[in-house]
Image (spheres, rainbow, N blue to C red):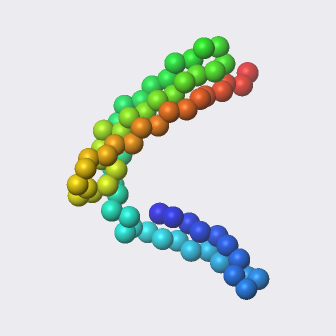
Amino acid sequence: MQKLKYKKDGKDVKDKLKGGYNTTDLVYGLSGYVAFGNVGIYAKYDLSPIFKDQVIEQNNISIGLRFDMD
């Protein structure tokens, strides 16, 4: 679902769009992180394809930093 909030002619407008994106309903994959003190590296690889009925199989990869605050 996508939620859009904006102003049109001075009035607040909220739109909700559902479906129609051709994406898979269930996302699953492998993830993990390694920490060095208060900083960690995060990685995730989705085993499920991004879109239904795609010609070329594409999977999502996410990487990032994690900061722990004590």
User: Is 38 left, or right, of 2 in this rendering?
Assistant: right
Q: Is residue 55 above or below residue 69?
A: below
Q: Is residue 12 above or below residue 48?
A: below
In which quarter of the view is residue 45 placed?
A: top left
Which residue: 30% across, 38% down? 47
Picture quarter with the C terminus: top right
Asked if one can make out residue 63 in the rendered structure from this viewpoint, the answer is yes
Image location of residue 52, percent across then percent down: 27, 57
Which residue: 43% across, 33% down? 44
Q: Is residue 14 above or below residue 62?
A: below
Asked if one can make out residue 28 in the rendered structure from this viewpoint, the answer is no
In which quarter of the view is residue 14 placed?
A: bottom right
Which residue: 55% across, 32% down? 64
Q: Is residue 69 above or below residue 55?
A: above
Image location of residue 9, percent across then percent down: 73, 85
- Which residue reaches farthest front? 56
In which quarter of the view is residue 21 placed?
A: bottom left
User: Is 39 left, or right, of 43 in this rendering?
Assistant: right
Of residues 17 and 9, which is closer to you in this image? 9
Image location of residue 48, percent across then percent down: 30, 44
- Which residue reaches farthest bottom? 9
Report the label total. 0
Which residue: 72% across, 25% down? 69
Image location of residue 63, percent across then percent down: 50, 33
- Which residue reaches farthest top? 37
User: Is 38 left, or right, of 3 in this rendering?
Assistant: right
